[in-house]
Image (cartoon, grey):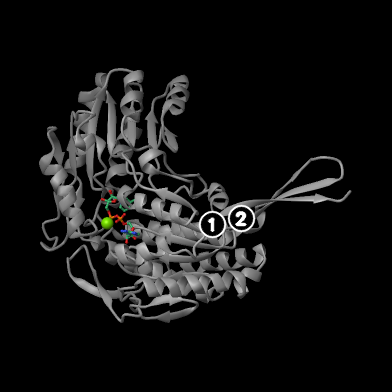
């Protein structure tokens, strides 16, 4: 147990060295729980990004990293997994300080972060190519190669987990990486950078430049020296990333959040449904791309479900992270104001409201959870991503209407289907337009083995599982005419 976790210095990791931003500037790091600054990060700019891209290029083409075998890369990543596990308590303390999330949720994040490096470390030497039967006298093989230098722009909701999710598969395939974490929360990213060095990661394979999105993030996504970019964040910035990728003729993955439904049919086992319905929107204060933010409830059980859901919502408390309640403060004043305006502008009836702990500091960014319904499926609460602890309950008559409402937003990330009817489970899972469907369950986050990603406004490309190894690599067909 670290009573006093070590807070990283305001430095970037470039080519194996920890260096201040070239402009010498820093940005304050604010604790969401108190609203007060407690640390600083480097305010990286375009020149720091250029240094990092050059360091990655060197590592990939001439450095130790580019010469390593898949087995060697995998071992370094397995070592990183061990070190993240060794330091999990300190990392969790810093993560909860930095993001405001309850300490036990931060601890779970570190288990997941370590697991990503374990999964992809173990997978590094198991990605095989193919052999194609072709004409007589020919031998054709299809090999998988890394893109080269990959850029990674990640958000503030799960900093440590996001390093695992996007960096581990890229490293497993042999890319050299440049990461621009979110300015709101990125201390554990820097800590994992240190652990990578301890694990023997060669200089330049993993570079980190902190700083503002429109400065450092924009510079990374525009840089002609990157070969691929992975982005997780808002649809608005996703458009910028994809436009810049197009200008550089490179590929990208975009993970842009959602308005994910959980569909509850009248035959569902409500004792199993209710905790998951509540948990999927309260986890991380609702600031989760795959948050279950719409509850579609069959009208025949509406009253019963709503009564039980309301009771649960009334017992939820937003509190400082060390109190370890159901949720903490939201990430920033901006995010709190955004969520509060959704709550105050909603046309749907407020069914139930949780509490903010009476001893929570007034300057912290707390929002009491809110349950609204019946919501018009076309209303902003039912259509837009709130990214806060706000659940929109929507009634439906039958299966057909449930599927129509579920598919009727611009997003398509995750869905939950609650029914004991096996045929209905199959029909509905097939009809839903999204990247993951859970039947009689729901997973927001985690699930490292499960390919994950969206359609339309939720983005495209897949991370997690083996799909990510394909995303972070490209294939080359080698045709050998041996006569
Ligand atoms: P954002 O999209 O602005 O931030 C995500 C990342 O992109 C951060 O690292 C940021 O520095 C970077 N960024 C910002 N502007 C950029 C630019 N012009 N070029 C390159 N990189 C840039 O998201 P923000 O403002 O923090 O949150 C706004 C909303 O976005 C949230 O309310 C939520 O709805 C959604 N969001 C979704 C996330 C997800 O997990 N899918 C994560 C974070 C936000
Ligand atoms: Mg933004």
Number of the label disc, if any, that sits on residue 123? 2
**Residue 96 is at least partly visible in this image:** no
Q: Position of residue 355 (x, y in %)?
A: 14, 49
Q: Residues within 10 Å of mark 1 (few under 14, many from 20)?
A: many
Q: Position of residue 96 (x, y in %)?
A: 30, 63
Q: Position of residue 57 (x, y in %)?
A: 54, 70
Viewer-side residue, 428 vs 152? 152
Identify the mark nearer the N-term, 1 or 2.
Answer: 2
Which residue is rendered at x = 61% and y = 63% of the image? Answer: 74
Q: How far, Cα to Cα, is label 1 from label 2?
A: 9 Å
Which residue is rendered at x = 28% and y = 66% of the image? Answer: 98
**Residue 58 is at least partly visible in this image:** yes
Which residue is rendered at x = 28% and y = 76% of the image? Answer: 26
Label 2 SS: helix
Q: Residue furthest front?
A: 247
Label 1 SS: helix
User: In what quadrant of the picture does the N terminus appear?
Assistant: bottom left
Using the image, determine if residue 175 lies above or below residue 64.
Answer: above
Nearer the camera: disc 1 or disc 2? 1
Viewer-side residue, 262 vs 154? 154
Q: Residue furthest right?
A: 483
Q: Decide if residue 397 is on the left or right side of residue 333.
A: right
Q: Residues within 10 Å of mark 2 (few under 14, many from 20)?
A: some
Q: Position of residue 281 (x, y in %)?
A: 28, 43
Q: Quadrant of ligand 1?
A: bottom left
Dot 1 corresponds to which residue? 169
Give the number of callouts: 2
Viewer-side residue, 370 vs 175? 175
Q: Decide if residue 1 is on the left or right side of residue 382.
A: right
Q: Check whether the beta carbons of the residues at disc 1 and disc 2 lie within 8 A of each other.
A: yes
Q: Decide if residue 45 is on the left or right side of residue 308.
A: right
Number of the label disc, if any, that sits on residue 333? none
């Amino acid at each position: 147990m670290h009573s006093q976790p070590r807070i990283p210095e305001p430095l970037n990791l470039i080519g194996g060295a920890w260096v201040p931003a070239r402009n010498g500037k820093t940005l304050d790091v604010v604790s969401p729980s108190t609203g007060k600054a407690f640390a600083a990060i480097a305010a990286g700019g375009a020149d720091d990004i250029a240094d990092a891209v050059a360091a990655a290029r060197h590592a990939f083409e001439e450095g130790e990293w580019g010469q390593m075998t898949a087995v060697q890369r995998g071992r370094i990543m397995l070592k990183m997994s061990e070190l993240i596990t060794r330091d999990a308590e300190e990392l969790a303390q810093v993560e909860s300080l930095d993001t405001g999330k309850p300490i036990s949720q931060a601890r779970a994040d570190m288990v997941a972060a370590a697991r990503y490096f374990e999964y992809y470390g173990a997978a590094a030497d198991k990605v095989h190519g193919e052999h194609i039967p072709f004409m007589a006298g020919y031998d054709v093989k299809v090999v998988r190669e890394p893109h080269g230098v990959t850029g990674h722009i990640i958000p503030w909701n799960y900093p440590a987990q996001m390093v695992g999710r996007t960096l581990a598969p890229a490293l497993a395939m042999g890319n050299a990486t440049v990461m621009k974490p979110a300015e709101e929360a990125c201390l554990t990213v820097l800590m994992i950078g240190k652990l990578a060095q301890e694990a023997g990661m060669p200089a330049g394979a993993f570079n980190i430049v902190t700083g503002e999105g429109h400065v450092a993030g924009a510079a990374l996504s525009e840089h002609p020296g990157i070969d691929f970019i992975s982005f997780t964040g808002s649809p608005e910035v996703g458009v910028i990333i994809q436009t810049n990728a197009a200008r550089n003729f490179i590929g990208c993955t975009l993970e842009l959040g959602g308005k994910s439904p959980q569909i509850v049919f009248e035959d569902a086992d409500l004792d199993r449904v209710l905790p998951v319905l509540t948990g999927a929107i309260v986890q991380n204060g609702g600031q989760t791309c795959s948050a279950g933010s719409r509850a579609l409830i069959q009208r025949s059980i509406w009253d019963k479900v709503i009564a039980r859901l309301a009771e649960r919502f009334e017992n939820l408390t937003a509190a400082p992270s060390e109190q370890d309640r159901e949720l903490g403060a939201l990430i920033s004043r901006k995010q709190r104001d955004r969520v509060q305006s959704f709550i105050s502008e909603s046309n749907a009836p407020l069914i139930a409201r949780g509490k903010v702990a009476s001893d929570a500091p007034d300057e912290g960014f707390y929002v009491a959870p809110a349950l609204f319904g019946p919501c018009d499926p076309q209303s902003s609460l039912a259509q837009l991503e709130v990214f806060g602890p706000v659940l929109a309950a929507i009634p439906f008559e039958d299966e057909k209407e449930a599927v129509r409402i579920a598919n009727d937003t611009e997003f398509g990330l995750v869905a939950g289907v609650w029914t004991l009817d096996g045929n209905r489970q199959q029909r509905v899972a097939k009809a839903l337009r999204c990247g993951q469907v859970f039947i009689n369950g729901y997973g927001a986050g985690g699930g490292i083995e499960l390919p994950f990603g969206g359609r339309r406004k939720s983005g495209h490309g897949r991370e997690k599982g083996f799909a990510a190894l394909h995303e972070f690599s490209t294939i080359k067909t080698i045709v050998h005419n041996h006569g």
